[in-house]
Structure formats: structure tokens, C-alpha cells
């Protein structure tokens, strides 16, 4: 039976047309059983204590598991059905269980530790040493290296944490769902038709007539940005920013205050058990930033540059609001509204003006040309590849010497059964274990509007940026030269650095030289007009200072909250946020504001003491791109160095080392400030 299971076949690419939901679990069961048997054998065999006899077999099994499940999770994303969803969930549960089992396998930990302590370790190459060190770090951070009773206490904390973090998130969801407010017809002034339609849908969902405001993100954003009615904006702002707290219209009903205390106390204790001073120190154990001092210095330096600009922007906005909108005392619920009015007055252009210049075939051609000039690789379409839909294209990634390095599936259009958004995902990882060489293969998935009325698919500029972003992740995976899957491509890269290659690629979508390769009117062939290009750039920089100080406020709050936690004093949430605002904010919200109580990113979403990563990665990508601005946007030598030092090495060495190898120095924030239009 298994020889007929396409998920277990050894072909170069998955046989998509042959895969059915019925194949999923037999294949996963088969691989997991083999994997388990191998782990038992490895831990029992005292001679399996070097890289070739312990780590290499583990990498092979990870690769095998990855290649078996990747097409399943991909199909779940792009061609879902009730049967597949069921098979997928069942398989995912098994994989999660397997992951936990491996991470908690004390005998396996001891075996890897023996490899680390053996005399041969120092003679291994960097990649092999990194596989060993990463594996050990994973074991340490999962608590398995602890002695009793600490090990049991650590496990206990993890269970409690996952429970309270889930409750935190549920309280936010419940508070979000529980509040609604009918919007009378005369209160709709200023709100565009698309947003009104959303308010009507909200009403219909509650079996009501007319328009209904809720606390869903897009609704709040639309009302705060467009509603002329100031009282309506204030009510939405108040209800939204007091969700799940002791304040506002739902005060006390879903209050997260006690949960925040519990979460911070448990995280702190867990970090201490693992030997870290705080949860912030723990968070940095596998991140590029390394030390709390470096994170704080980074955020404060950025704040020092951004704050004066934000102040200027706010002052200007106040003058505009008073003179043009009759708002003499600009309040937090007026800021988005007044900003939008100012933006419209200054340089409004609609996405519709730009779309004719971004026909998809031409954008793809431009993107491939950028890849060829910068990375020295050609994307050559291979026809007749078995895929999941006729619209899917497959490309070989061919190096300048003619070697086929990798392959990539491109699936552009929105369809039913396909998850929204855009993403890059791994189909096959590169592995070169001495016996066999597997080439990396990726999926690039987007949800662009398909062609209609005989016109090519026309993209918005946001779509173009998204495409470049995901293609950047793709290049990272596809151009890896690392032999071991766990540290090749995007795998094993510190998480505050993994967005470097993707955000880096976005920059090309803003460059005249790159736009000139593809931004041509689909009917007239005319290049993107200078006036329109200038407006795009201005709009990109509009209120960048205000945006940055807000991000800095979130990042500093998150980081200091976890860093400074002291069991004797408790969480001090409101004190910390107050101090942070005093340092970086330009507009202080009212004292009843309770943003932290719904800050799911850090209390339930895995960004604890890691919110700074957004800005950190932006600094890396802007600074890396600045090397191209200095040498020429398509400079081949700079491109080759970038490919060699950043893309090819993946997670095989620390990201900071890779960055320095490429740039000749540590990252500096100037390029980011320039890209925000904030350079001094
Ligand atoms: Zn990304």
C-alpha cells in the first residue's frame, strides 16, 4: 500500500494530481513510526555519538517528514476541502505530539550533549557545529536539560502559561464581540461606501437593519479614519482601547489585569529556572540582538531621531485640524481622521491610478530581471509539471553557469478553497548528506485578482510590494548552499533577522531603476509618470515619525515590562507604559486607556520581549539595501556578496556575522531613517 502512496514516493517533486486526503495519515504514520524507531535505535546505541552517526540521521528523518507533510499543508492552504481539512488536522496533531516528544527526550538530549563534548567537535565545520549547538539550545530552552524538581516545575509552568495565555486571548475576543453600536444614517457622513457596506454586513450578522459599528479591527479603523462625527469616533476609540480591562463601557467584564500579572510572574519564574535573569534575557537567547542593552540602545537611539519628527508632524496636524476641520483641541480619536484629511489634501492618488502600470506578466518579468541582475540567477519556466491548478507555473532557478539550483511554484490568483494573503512556503529543503543531494523547492502563493475583461491581471502597488517580499523569502530558501535542512535557507535563522531578505526585496519596488523594468501602462506602454512616482514616495513617508514613535512605544513597553519584572513589585503595567510614553510618545492617551489589556502579540502571540523585532529587521533590510544604493541598485558585485554572505549561509552562522560579512560593519539605523524620510 505504501509504495502506492504518492506522499511517500521518491520523485523530484510531489505528484499533486495523485494526492488524495486518504493518503495523508497513512503516510504520516509511516514516516513517524520510522522516525520513532530510529530515535530509539540512536539513543540506545552508544556508538551513535558523533555527527555522522547521530545528527545526520536525525536531519535525514526531519527532511523526510518535511517533504511528506509539506504538500499536505500546502494543499490545505491552496485547495482545501472538508476531507482534506480533517486529514490535515489529524496529521498536524500527530506532528505536534511528535515534536513535543522529541523536545522532551532526555536520552536524546544526553546523546547530542555527548557529541558536543566529544574531542572531535571542534574539528567539525561551522554548519555541523551549528546543527549541534542549535539542537542543544532547543533542548535547554524546552526545560529537558533541567534536573528535578526544576524540570517538573518548568513543565507545570508551561502548562499553566498556555492556559492563561489562551484565556487572555479569549477575553480580548469576547470583549471585541460583546460591544456594538448602531450607526444612524446621519452619522455615516464621511464614511466611504466600502466601509458602509462592512457596517451593513455587521448589522446583518446580528439580524439587524441599517449599519452597526463593532470593535473588529477594520471597522474601528474605518470609523476612526473617515467618520466626520466626532462623538462616534470618541465612542469607538474608548470602547476599543478599554477592551478586556477595568475601564470603559465593559469595565470589569472581561478584565485581563489579573491574567497579565500571572503571565508575567510565570514567565519570569520559568526564565529563572533556565538560568536567565528575566524573560527578556530568555527571549534573546535565540535572537540576533543578543543582549537587553543592545535592544534598549537600539530603540532609544531610534526614538531620539524619530521623536522630534513626530512632534513636528503632530504640531502641523494640530494647526491643520484647527484651521481646516474646526478641531481646536486635537484628541487621540481625531488623529487618524485629521491625518487622512491632510493626506488627501496633500497628495492623494488612488490605487486605481497606479494599477494600469502594474500588469502581472510585466511585473513578474521585472522581478525575474531584478533576480538575474542582482543574484545572477535566471528563472526558467518548466512546462508540464504536475500541480494543483492549471494557473500554477513552475520555474527552475538556473545559475549563471547553467546549474539548476532550485525550483519554485508560483500560484498568483485568488480562488475559492484558497487561504487569503500571500506567503512563501517550503516544499523541499536542500540536503546534501554525502549520499544524496536534494534541491530546495518553494511555493510562492498570492491572492491577486485574476485577469478579467480581456485585460491582464492588474496589481496595486501594495500587491507588487507583497510579491517582492515573498520572493525575497523565496530567494533565501532557494539559494541556500547549506547542506543540512535544519539550518538551511530560512531555517534556524534568528527570528529577529529572518525578515531581512524579504523586506530587502521590497526596496526594489520603490526604486525608479527597478520600476522602469516593469511599470508600464498595459495599454499604451507608457512608463510610470514622474508625478505619480513622486506622489507614491511622498505618501510612503507621510507621518512616518508618528508611525515610528508608536511602534517604539509598543516595543519599549514590551521589552521593559519583561526585563524589569520583579516578583516583589508585580507587573507595574501602568507605571511602565507611563514611563515609556514619557520617553517616546508625542501624544499621551487619556489615563483610562488600557491598550496593554488587549496586546495579544505579547501576552498570547509569541512576541513576548520580541516586539522590537519588527523594527530591528527593518533596520537590517534598509541598511543592507543601502549597500546597493551606494554601489548601484543592480551592482553585480554587491549582489554576489549579498547572495554569498546572507542568502547562501542561512542559519549556519549567527545573523550578525553574516551581516558584518556583507556590509563590513554592524547594522546602523541611518538607512531606515532615510527610508522613512527622517534622515537628519
Ligand atoms: Zn515576511
Image (cartoon, grey):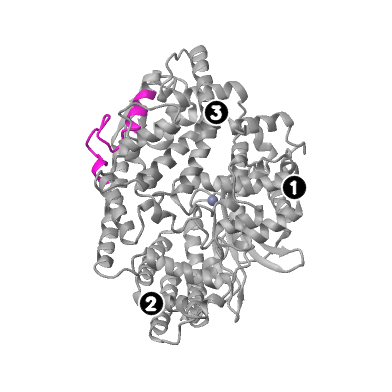
Image quadrant assignment for residue 356: top right
Horizontal and vertical percent for residue 196?
A: 44, 28
| Contact flag, marks 1 and 2 (Cβ < 8 Å) | no
Q: Magenta span has 117?
A: no
Could you tell whether 618 is left or right of 611 in the image? right
Q: Position of residue 138 (x, y in %)?
A: 42, 66
Q: CA distance from mark 1 to mark 2?
A: 49 Å
Query: Can residue 448 be seen in this snapshot?
Result: no
Q: CA distance from mark 1 to mark 3?
A: 29 Å
Residue at left offset 61%, top offset 40%: 670
For marks 1 and 3 on the same chain, the one whose residue lies earlier in the sequence:
3
Q: Position of residue 499 (x, y in %)?
A: 55, 51
Q: Which residues are magenta?
A: 233-259
Q: Secondary structure at mark 1?
A: helix
Measuring 40% from the left and 19% from the top, which residue is drawn there?
230
Per the rendering, the mark at residue 631 is: 1
Amino acid at each position: 500500500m505504501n509504495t502506492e502512496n504518492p506522499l511517500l514516493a521518491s520523485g523530484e517533486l510531489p505528484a499533486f494530481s495523485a494526492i488524495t486526503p486518504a493518503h495523508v495519515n497513512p503516510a504520516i504514520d509511516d514516516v513517524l513510526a520510522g522516525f520513532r524507531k530510529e530515535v530509539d535505535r540512536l539513543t540506545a546505541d552508544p556508538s551513535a555519538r558523533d555527527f555522522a552517526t547521530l545528527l545526520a540521521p536525525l536531519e535525514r528523518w526531519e527532511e523526510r517528514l518535511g517533504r511528506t507533510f509539506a504538500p499536505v499543508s500546502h494543499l490545505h492552504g491552496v485547495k482545501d476541502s472538508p476531507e482534506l481539512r480533517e486529514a490535515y488536522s489529524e496529521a498536524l496533531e500527530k506532528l505536534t505530539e511528535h515534536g513535543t516528544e522529541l523536545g522532551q527526550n532526555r536520552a536524546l538530549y544526553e546523546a547530542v550533549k555527548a557529541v558536543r563534548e566529544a574531542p572531535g567537535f571542534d574539528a567539525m565545520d561551522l554548519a555541523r557545529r551549528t546543527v549541534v549547538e542549535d539542537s542543544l539550545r532547543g533542548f535547554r530552552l524546552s526545560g529537558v536539560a533541567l534536573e528535578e524538581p526544576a524540570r517538573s516545575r518548568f513543565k507545570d509552568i508551561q502548562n499553566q502559561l498556555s492556559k492563561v495565555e489562551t484565556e487572555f486571548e479569549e477575553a480580548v475576543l469576547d470583549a471585541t464581540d460583546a460591544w456594538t453600536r448602531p450607526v444612524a444614517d446621519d452619522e455615516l457622513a464621511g464614511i466611504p461606501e466600502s466601509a458602509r457596506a462592512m457596517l451593513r454586513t455587521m448589522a446583518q450578522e446580528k439580524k439587524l437593519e441599517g449599519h452597526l459599528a463593532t470593535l473588529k479591527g477594520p471597522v474601528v479603523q474605518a470609523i476612526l479614519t473617515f467618520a466626520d462625527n466626532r462623538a462616534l469616533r470618541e465612542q469607538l476609540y474608548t470602547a476599543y482601547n478599554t477592551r478586556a480591562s477595568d475601564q470603559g463601557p465593559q469595565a470589569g467584564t472581561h478584565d485581563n489585569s489579573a491574567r497579565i500579572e500571572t503571565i508575567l510572574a510565570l514567565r519570569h519564574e520559568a526564565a529563572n529556572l533556565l538560568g536567565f535573569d528575566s524573560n527578556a534575557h530568555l527571549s534573546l537567547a535565540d535572537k540576533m540582538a543578543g543582549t537587553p542593552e543592545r535592544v534598549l540602545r537600539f530603540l532609544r537611539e531610534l526614538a531620539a531621531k524619530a521623536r522630534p519628527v513626530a512632534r513636528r508632524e503632530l504640531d502641523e496636524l494640530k494647526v491643520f485640524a484647527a484651521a481646516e476641520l474646526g478641531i481646536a483641541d486635537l484628541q487621540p480619536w481625531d488623529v487618524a481622521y485629521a491625518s487622512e484629511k491632510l493626506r488627501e489634501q496633500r497628495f492623494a492618488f488612488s490605487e486605481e491610478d497606479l494599477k494600469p502600470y502594474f500588469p502581472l506578466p510585466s511585473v513578474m518579468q521585472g522581478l525575474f530581471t531584478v533576480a538575474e541582475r542582482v543574484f545572477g540567477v535566471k528563472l526558467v519556466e518548466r512546462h508540464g509539471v504536475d500541480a494543483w491548478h492549471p494557473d500554477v507555473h513552475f520555474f527552475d532557478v538556473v545559475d549563471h553557469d547553467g546549474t539548476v539550483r532550485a525550483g519554485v511554484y508560483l500560484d498568483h490568483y485568488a480562488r475559492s478553497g484558497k487561504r487569503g494573503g500571500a506567503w512563501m512556503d517550503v516544499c523541499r529543503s536542500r540536503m546534501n548528506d554525502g549520499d544524496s543531494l536534494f534541491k530546495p523547492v518553494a511555493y510562492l502563493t498570492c491572492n491577486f485578482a485574476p485577469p478579467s475583461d480581456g485585460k491582464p491581471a492588474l496589481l496595486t502597488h501594495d500587491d507588487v510590494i507583497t510579491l517582492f517580499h515573498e520572493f525575497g523569502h523565496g530567494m533565501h530558501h532557494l539559494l541556500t548552499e547549506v547542506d543540512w535542512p535544519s539550518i538551511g535557507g530560512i531555517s534556524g535563522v534568528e527570528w529577529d533577522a529572518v525578515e531581512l531578505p524579504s523586506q530587502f526585496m521590497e526596496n526594489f519596488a520603490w526604486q525608479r531603476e527597478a520600476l522602469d523594468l516593469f511599470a508600464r501602462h498595459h495599454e499604451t506602454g507608457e512608463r510610470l509618470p514622474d508625478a505619480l512616482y513622486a506622489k507614491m514616495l511622498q505618501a510612503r513617508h507621510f507621518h512616518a515619525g508618528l508611525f515610528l514613535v508608536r511602534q517604539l512605544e509598543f516595543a519599549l513597553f514590551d521589552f521593559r515590562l519583561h526585563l524589569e519584572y520583579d516578583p516583589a513589585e508585580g507587573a507595574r503595567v501602568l507605571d511602565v507604559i507611563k514611563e515609556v510614553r514619557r520617553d517616546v510618545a508625542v501624544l499621551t492617551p487619556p489615563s483610562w486607556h488600557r491598550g496593554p489589556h488587549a496586546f495579544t502579540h505579547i501576552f498570547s502571540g509569541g512576541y513576548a520581549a520580541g516586539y522590537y523585532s519588527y523594527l530591528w529587521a527593518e533596520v537590517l533590510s534598509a541598511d543592507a539595501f543601502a549597500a546597493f544604493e551606494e554601489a548601484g541598485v543592480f551592482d553585480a558585485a554587491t549582489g554576489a556578496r549579498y547572495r554569498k554572505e546572507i542568502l547562501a549561509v542561512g542559519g549556519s552562522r549567527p545573523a550578525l556575522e553574516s551581516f558584518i560579512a556583507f556590509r563590513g560593519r554592524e547594522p546602523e539605523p541611518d538607512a531606515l531613517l532615510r527610508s522613512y524620510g527622517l534622515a537628519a
